[in-house]
C-alpha cells in the first residue's frame, strides 16, 4: 500500500519518518497518555524507533496499518498521530493520540475525521471500530465528535499494565463519515 498525505485544511496528515522518532519518544513519556495507552515502561528511544520503523513504516508496506502524523500545515509543528489497524473484510481499528502541548485544539477530531473519510474513499473500508479503556473520556469525546456511535462496554476486553480492563467500543460506517 502506498503511503500518502491527507490535506485537512489547517492540519496535514503525513507518513512518519525517522526524523519523528525523538518526538514520538517525548510524547510517549507524557503521564496522561501513559494512563490509557499500553506502552512499555520505562519507555525508551528504541521503543519509539520500533513504532516509527516497524509499526508505522513497515505496517504501510505490508498493508497492515495506515499511520499518519498530524502536523500544523502552516508551521509544520508535530501535533499528534492517528492510525488504522487494517483487518480483513473491509474493516479497521482506529487509534490516536495528541502531543500534550496541542491538546484542546481539535487536532484529534480533525485528524480522525480526515483519516476516516480517506479510508472509506481510498481503501474502500465499510466499518471503522474505536475502542478505549472505560474512563478515557477525552478519547470518547473525540470519537463521538467524529461521528462514532458508542455501542457497548466490553467487559475486561483490554489489557493495560498487565490488568484486564473494561473497554468502550464504537463504530463508524462508511455512509456516516462526516
Image (cartoon, rainbow, N blue to C red):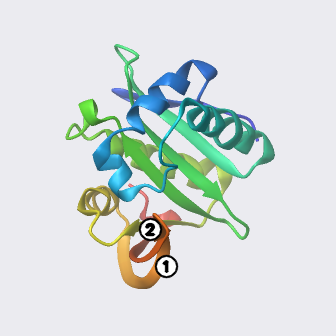
Location of residue 73 by image quarter:
top left
**Which residue is under mark 1?**
157
> Looking at the image, which residue sits at the far right?
62
Residue 108: x percent and y percent?
34, 44
Residue nearer the viewer, 119 or 56: 56
**Which residue is under mark 2?**
131
Taking the image as shown, residue 64 lies to the left or right of residue 20, namely right
C-alpha span from label 1 to label 2: 9 Å
Location of residue 101 by image quarter:
top left
Task: Tell me, yes or no, whether the two marked residues, 1 and 2, touch with CB atoms within 8 Å.
Answer: yes
Q: Residues within 10 Å of mark 1 (few under 14, many from 20)?
A: some
**Above or below 155: residue 91:** above
State the SS at label 2: strand
Q: Residues within 10 Å of mark 2 (few under 14, many from 20)?
A: many
> Looking at the image, which residue sits at the far top?
75
> Residue at coordinates 59% horizontally, 38% vertically from top-left?
47
Residue 124: x percent and y percent?
66, 57
Residue 122: x percent and y percent?
64, 47
Residue 120: x percent and y percent?
57, 55
> Residue at coordinates 55% horizontally, 46% vertically from top-left?
118
Residue nearer the viewer, 68 or 11: 68
> Looking at the image, which residue sits at the far front?
42
For the C terminus, the quadrant is bottom left
| Residue 70 visible at all | no
Location of residue 156 by image quarter:
bottom left
> Residue at coordinates 44% horizontally, 44% vertically from top-left?
114
Q: In the image, which is nearer the foreground, mark 1 or mark 2?
A: 1
Q: Earlier in the sequence, mark 1 or mark 2?
A: 2
Q: How many marks?
A: 2
Q: Which mark is residue 144?
A: none
| Residue 68 visible at all | yes
Amino acid at each position: 500500500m502506498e503511503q500518502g498525505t491527507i490535506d485537512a485544511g489547517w492540519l496535514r496528515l503525513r507518513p512518519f519518518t525517522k526524523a519523528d522518532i525523538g518526538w514520538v519518544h517525548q510524547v510517549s513519556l507524557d503521564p496522561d497518555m501513559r494512563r490509557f495507552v499500553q506502552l512499555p515502561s520505562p519507555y525508551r528511544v528504541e521503543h519509539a524507533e520500533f513504532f516509527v520503523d516497524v509499526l508505522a513504516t513497515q505496517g504501510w508496506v505490508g498493508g497492515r496499518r495506515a499511520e499518519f502524523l498530524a502536523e500544523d500545515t502552516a508551521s509544520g509543528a508535530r501535533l499528534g498521530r492517528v492510525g488504522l489497524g487494517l483487518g480483513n473484510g473491509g474493516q479497521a481499528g482506529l487509534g490516536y493520540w495528541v502531543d500534550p502541548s496541542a491538546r484542546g485544539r481539535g487536532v484529534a477530531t480533525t485528524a480522525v475525521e480526515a483519516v476516516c473519510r480517506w479510508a472509506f474513499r481510498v481503501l474502500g473500508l465499510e466499518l471503522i471500530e474505536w475502542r478505549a479503556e472505560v474512563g478515557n473520556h477525552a478519547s470518547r469525546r473525540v470519537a463521538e465528535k467524529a461521528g462514532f456511535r458508542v455501542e457497548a462496554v466490553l467487559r475486561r476486553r483490554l489489557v493495560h499494565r498487565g490488568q484486564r480492563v473494561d473497554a468502550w467500543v464504537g463504530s463508524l460506517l462508511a455512509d456516516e463519515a462526516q
